[in-house]
Image: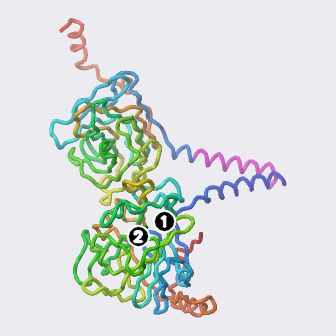
Amino acid sequence: MRLKATAYAVVVGLVVLSAGTLANEVIRGDIPGGVFGEVYQCGFHPQNTVVLDGKLDDLAWVHAPWHYVDNRTGTAPAPDPDDASYQFAAVADNDWLYVAFQVWDDEIRTGENLGGDVWKDDSVEIYIDPNNGKTASYETGNGTWDSQITIGAINIGGDPEAPQLAGTGDGAGSGTRAAVVEWEKGWIVEAAVPLDLPGRWDIRPADGLRIGFNTHLNDDDDGGERDHKLIWSVKDVADQSWQNTSVFGELEFVSAFLAVDPKGKLPIYWGAIKVGRIGTQGDETR
Amino acid sequence: MSDRQHLLLLVLSLGAGFLTALHAVGGVFLDEFEDGVANGWNPIQGTWTIQEGRYVLERGAERGDSAAVALLASPWKIADGTISVVVAYDESSDGIERPLILFRMKDELNGYAIRIRGNEKHIDLGRLEGGTFVYIRGDAVDIMEADRPMEITVEVEGQFAFIYYNGELRMRLGDPDRKFEDPGLIGLGGMDIAAPVYFDNFRVEGEGVTQFAPDLRPVSPRGKLALRWADLKGF
């Protein structure tokens, strides 16, 4: 009996050891969350509003799905998850697409590179292809304007209404707001991208609507050049999102009222099951 | 099931797992160039020699924009696997030479190339197309010291090449066009060769890889005798 127990303990131990490392995953919220690196499911509702204060305690974030990007996923991987890794989530109300990043970063570096070179310092990038055109170069028409929105850690403690932004496709002119704060293991970005940006895009969330979307993290450990580059989209194998929207993943809008306390959630969840929107896809938890 | 049966089952399971792992690791080819000859290497372009236990690219290809190439004339080809080599610049170099590590070579001048830019502290992934380097993507390796030998390891896995500098993972790069996916030959090369570039401790690991001995391969005696006789006669 003792032998049997030992044998099972060894097998269980091996399984636990092999599963013990952090890896890319979809952490489901009230909605499944999509498929890692391909589709992010974004809950939208007029009341999914987020307060831009750098705190991730808004109910929308608590109930949104998160995608965790590990330290090896990108063109310049980091040696361990504490050096560089991140998770992100997105929700929308009528006016804004909110995107939150929780970044693990053991060495925050800012201020050495400014403006268009902020990607060489610690920064996150949000990519938007409003018409999901998947074009090999950025489109610049009204309604099709593609944009890379780079938000540096240099904004830590800055004014959320007027962050320093950069990025191709005039990321600096994207009207994005962002609160950036430190946390014990890195830094946090809470950004709001306007859904209606005159002359550029007018995204009107609807159930099942998809836009092109991607997120990146740039990590600088020691000044000078960027040291690590992590990328969510599985198609962006050569860090081309800054000029090519065909390598973006997608963001799918899903009608879901996330900013409520659990008391009110059951009818909505039941409603989603009734219409077949909630399945087992992305049914992983950390 | 008795305790003994449980133990047997456990041993068999672990054994099967071990054998599977061994199979996945495959074999190893190693050339440290200590024998003073470059048997098994097929220089395509450039001037290649052996000096002090290192394979040396002394002069580049005749055409300026073309890469010097030497392919390993292995009996096997691989798509995935691990290639590592120690690369060193000459003392007289400013690091402007561009050593190359080649894999999935479809033929002599087409396949993937890892390019080292010593003076710029950069490593790139590109394609050799007709011997010309087509850049895909690279990144800075700010810990690079071009005046010291550097161990470069390339772990090729499906669409990705994981690139290690002195044992540290620095890049995970892929070709969005997936141009070369089939098994191919491995090689070394260089561009902009103003001073010699040295290669040492060349190692390939992958499924089906073997340590081959080119000297022991059967050769046709036809045509050999006359030449040998001429050598003896002192012509």
Q: Which residue is mark 1?
A: A69
**Which of the marked residues, 1 or 2, is nearer the chain's N terminus?**
1
In x, y percent, where is residue A89?
48, 76
In x, y percent, where is residue B192?
22, 39
Q: At 55% from the left edge and 69% from the top edge, which residue is drawn?
A: A183
The boundaries of the magenta stretch are: B1-19
Q: Which residue is mark 2?
A: A215
Near-viewer residue (A29 or A90): A90
Most extreme residue toward the left is B63
* Distance (Cα) linking label 1 and label 2: 10 Å
Residue A214 quadrant: bottom left
In x, y percent, where is residue B148?
38, 35
Above-or-below relation of A194 to B144 = below
Figure quadrant of the C terminus of chain B:
top left
> Are the two marked residues, 1 and 2, in contact with CB atoms closer than 8 angstroms?
yes
Above-or-below relation of A154 to A197 = above
SS at circle 2: strand
Figure quadrant of the N terminus of chain B:
bottom right
Above-or-below relation of B196 to A12 = above
Q: Would you call the spot at circle 1 few (<14 residues within 10 Å), some (14-19), or many (20 or more)?
A: many
Residue type indicated by callout 2? Thr
Most extreme residue toward the top is B233
Q: At 50% from the left edge and 53% from the top edge, which residue is drawn?
A: A79
Q: At 48% from the left edge and 88% from the top edge, which residue is drawn?
A: A49
Q: Is residue B12 magenta?
A: yes
In x, y percent, where is residue B40?
34, 29
